[in-house]
Image (cartoon, rainbow, N blue to C red):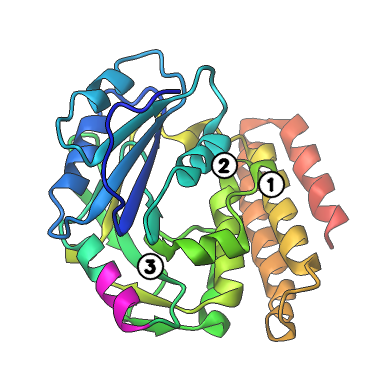
C-alpha cells in the first residue's frame, strides 16, 4: 500500500474504492475533479486489481488525487472501510468506482452542512446510466428537496433498497456511529444508512443537477450477490438494527413493517426461483422466512 501523491488537508474526502474498473475509473475520478466545489481530496483505494485500474488512477496529475493499493484482495466491504479510514476531510463521501458525481453535488452538500450544524449528513437522489453514460432513469427516496428527520427517513431506509443516490456525511458523525459492518456483505451500506438515520436528520436533494449517477452494467457488484446471500444479509441487518438497545423507542415500532416488507420482497424472489426450478435456494429462503415470522 503506497500513496502516489500528497495533498493539504481538504474539507471534503471523496473515497473511491475500486476493483477491476479500468473501463470507468477515469470517468469517475474526472466527474469529481469537474465539480464546482474544489476543496476536496480523492482517495482511490484499489483492491489489488488485475487490470489497469490503479495505473489509470495514478496517471491523474491533479495533486488532490491520492492512490492506494492493497497488497491482496480484501473484498468490497473491507475495501470501503479502508478507503474511509484514509479520509482526512471534515466531510466524507463514498463513490463507487463506476459511478459519477453531478458537477453541483459537492457544492450543494457542503452548503447545507455548513448552514445547518444539526444535520449529520446530506443525501441526494440518483439516476441510472448505461455503460456509455446515457441516463436511463432518475429517482430517490423522497420527492421533495428538504430536511428529513429519523421518523421519515428511518422507515424508508428499513426497506433496504439503498439511498438510490449518494451521501456526504460529517466525519465526526461517521466516527461516532461506526463504519461499514463487514459481516453484512454487500448490503452493508443499507445497515450503515440505518444507523445514521436513527440518530441524525439529513437534507435531501431531489434534483438531477446535484445528484449521483449509478452505472448499470454486467459487472456490477449486485450481479454477484446471490438470492440466498441477499436474503440472509437482509435479515441480519434488520435483526441487528432492531435488537440494538440504543435504538430509540420511537423507531422500534417500524420493526414489524420492515420485516413484512422484506417478506413480500422475498415472496417475489421465491416465485422467480420456482420458475427457474432452483429448489435448493427456494428451500433455504423459505427456511429463513419461517425463522422470522
Q: Can residue 101 be seen in this view?
A: yes
Main secondary-structure element of the magenta-colored stretch: helix
Q: Is mark 2 on a helix, strand or loop?
A: helix
- Element carrying mark 3: strand
Residue extent of the magenta highlight: 110-116
Was residue 5 drawn as part of the magenta stretch in this picture? no
Mark 3 vs mark 2: which is more N-terminal?
Answer: 3
Residue projecting furthest to the top: 50
Q: Are marks 1 and 3 in contact (CB under 8 Å)?
A: no
Q: Mark 1 points at which residue?
A: 233
Q: Distance between the residues labelled 1 and 2?
A: 8 Å
* Left or right: where 241 falls relative to 153: right
Q: Nearer the viewer, residue 221 or 179?
A: 179
Q: Residue beneath label 3, please?
A: 123
Label of residue 192 in the image: none
Which residue is under mark 2? Answer: 186
| Rendered-image quadrant of the N terminus | top left
Q: Where is residue 176 in the image (x, y as percent from the top left)?
A: 60, 64
Does residue 45 appear left or right of residue 290 in this picture? left
Q: In this rendering, is residue 208 above or below 278?
A: below
Q: In this picture, is 171 found above or below 228?
A: below
Q: In which quarter of the image is residue 217?
A: top left
Find residue 53 and report its horizontal and vertical position in percent. Answer: 31, 22
Amino acid at each position: 500500500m503506497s500513496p502516489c501523491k500528497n495533498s493539504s488537508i481538504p474539507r471534503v474526502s471523496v473515497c473511491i474504492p475500486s476493483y477491476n474498473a479500468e473501463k470507468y475509473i477515469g470517468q469517475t475520478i474526472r466527474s469529481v475533479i469537474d465539480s464546482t466545489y474544489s476543496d476536496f481530496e480523492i482517495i482511490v483505494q484499489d483492491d489489488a486489481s488485475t487490470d489497469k485500474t490503479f495505473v489509470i488512477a495514478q496517471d491523474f496529475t491533479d495533486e488532490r488525487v491520492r492512490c492506494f493499493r492493497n497488497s491482496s484482495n480484501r473484498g468490497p466491504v473491507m475495501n470501503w472501510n479502508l478507503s474511509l479510514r484514509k479520509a482526512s476531510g471534515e466531510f466524507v463521501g463514498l463513490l463507487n468506482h463506476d459511478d459519477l458525481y453531478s458537477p453541483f453535488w459537492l457544492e450543494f452538500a457542503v452548503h447545507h452542512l455548513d448552514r445547518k450544524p444539526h444535520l449529520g449528513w446530506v443525501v441526494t437522489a440518483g439516476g441510472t446510466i448505461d455503460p456509455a453514460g446515457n441516463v436511463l432513469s432518475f429517482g430517490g427516496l423522497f420527492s421533495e428537496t428538504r430536511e428529513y428527520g429519523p421518523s421519515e427517513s428511518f422507515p424508508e431506509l428499513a426497506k433496504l433498497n439503498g439511498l438510490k443516490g449518494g451521501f456526504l456525511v460529517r466525519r465526526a458523525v461517521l466516527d461516532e456511529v461506526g463504519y461499514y459492518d463487514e459481516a453484512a456483505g454487500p448490503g452493508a451500506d443499507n445497515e450503515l444508512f440505518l444507523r445514521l438515520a436513527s440518530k441524525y436528520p439529513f437534507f435531501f436533494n431531489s434534483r438531477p443537477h446535484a445528484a449521483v449517477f449509478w452505472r448499470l452494467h454486467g459487472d456490477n457488484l449486485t450481479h454477484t450477490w446471490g438470492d440466498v446471500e441477499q436474503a440472509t444479509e437482509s435479515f441480519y441487518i434488520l435483526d441487528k438494527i432492531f435488537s440494538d438497545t440504543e435504538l430509540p423507542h420511537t423507531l422500534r415500532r417500524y420493526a414489524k413493517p420492515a420485516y413484512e416488507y422484506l417478506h413480500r420482497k422475498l415472496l417475489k424472489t421465491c416465485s422467480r426461483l420456482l420458475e427457474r426450478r432452483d429448489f435448493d435456494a427456494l428451500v433455504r429462503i423459505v427456511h429463513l422466512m419461517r425463522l422470522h415470522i
